Amino acid sequence: MSTARQELLKLLAQKSFRLGEFKLSSGGTSDYYIDCRTTTLDARGAQLVGQVFLEEMRRQGWHADAIGGLTMGADPIVVAVAVTSGTLHGFLVRKAEKQHGTGQRIEGYREKDARVVIVDDVCTTGSSTVQAIEAAREFGFKVVGTMCLVEREDAHGRPNVERAAAPAPFISIFTANEVRKEHLAIST
């Protein structure tokens, strides 16, 4: 594991992982909660997210023009990766088209046929990532890959995203179990 990746895992375990009883947006309950925004919006966390996502994209051989995802979980990841790369453009996908102005659902980079990577902070059911994939393709983007910062392995997220993204691959930077293990290691 790269030094940046290890540092990001430690930061997620310290800042974003909580044990307890939590209701999830999917309607289920869990004995842990991961709020990645406390890491992705942290100054050092944002630097690490940009570096680690970009390293993984390069490792996968994804040659993308832009990176984007469904607002709000993807927003800080998109900015971090775009700034770190110096060449990738960013775009955000609204949950619904704007009801005023230009009525756009895709904000930011808007070049048809562009090769894009879809990102999200946490993947539980995968519905946010799937919505972003569908909106990107409907707009005219070519999805070359999908990534999430933390994958919760207790739901059907991975199969849902893999089905929607096909033939583009789905990669998670960390699993919830990895973050939990690190959290427990630094808490004792």
Image (spheres, helix red, strand yellow):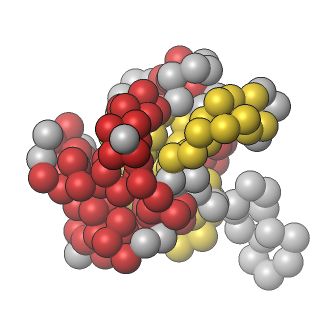
Q: Is residue 136 above or below residue 98?
A: above
Residue in the image at 74% along x and 55% along y:
95
Would you identify the image quadrant in which residue 170 lies? top left
Q: Give 55 or 95, whichever is nearer the viewer.
A: 55
| Left or right placement of residue 68 versus residue 115 in this view | right
Residue in the image at 45% along x and 40% along y:
150
Q: Give 99 or 48, whichever is nearer the viewer.
A: 48
Using the rendered image of the protein, determine whether residue 86 is visible from the camera's viewpoint.
Answer: yes
Using the rendered image of the protein, determine whether residue 141 is visible from the camera's viewpoint.
Answer: no
Q: Is residue 40 above or below residue 171?
A: below
Q: Residue furthest right?
A: 99
Q: How far from the left and from the top, in percent, is residue 128? A: 64, 43
Q: How far from the left and from the top, in percent, is residue 80? A: 36, 69
Residue in the image at 18% along x and 56% along y:
4
Q: Is residue 177 above or below residue 51?
A: above
Q: Give 93 or 49, whichever is nearer the viewer.
A: 49
Residue in the image at 55% along x and 36% along y:
123
Q: How far from the left and from the top, in percent, is residue 16? A: 50, 53
| Left or right placement of residue 150 versus residue 98 in this view | left
Would you identify the image quadrant in which residue 169 lies? top left
Q: Quadrant of the N terminus?
A: top left
Q: How far from the left and from the top, in percent, is residue 125? A: 64, 29
Would you identify the image quadrant in which residue 185 lies? top left
All told, the count of numbered labels is: 0
Q: Quadrant of the C terminus?
A: top left
Q: Residue furthest front?
A: 188
| Left or right placement of residue 13 versus residue 185 in this view | right
| Left or right placement of residue 171 versus residue 74 in this view | left
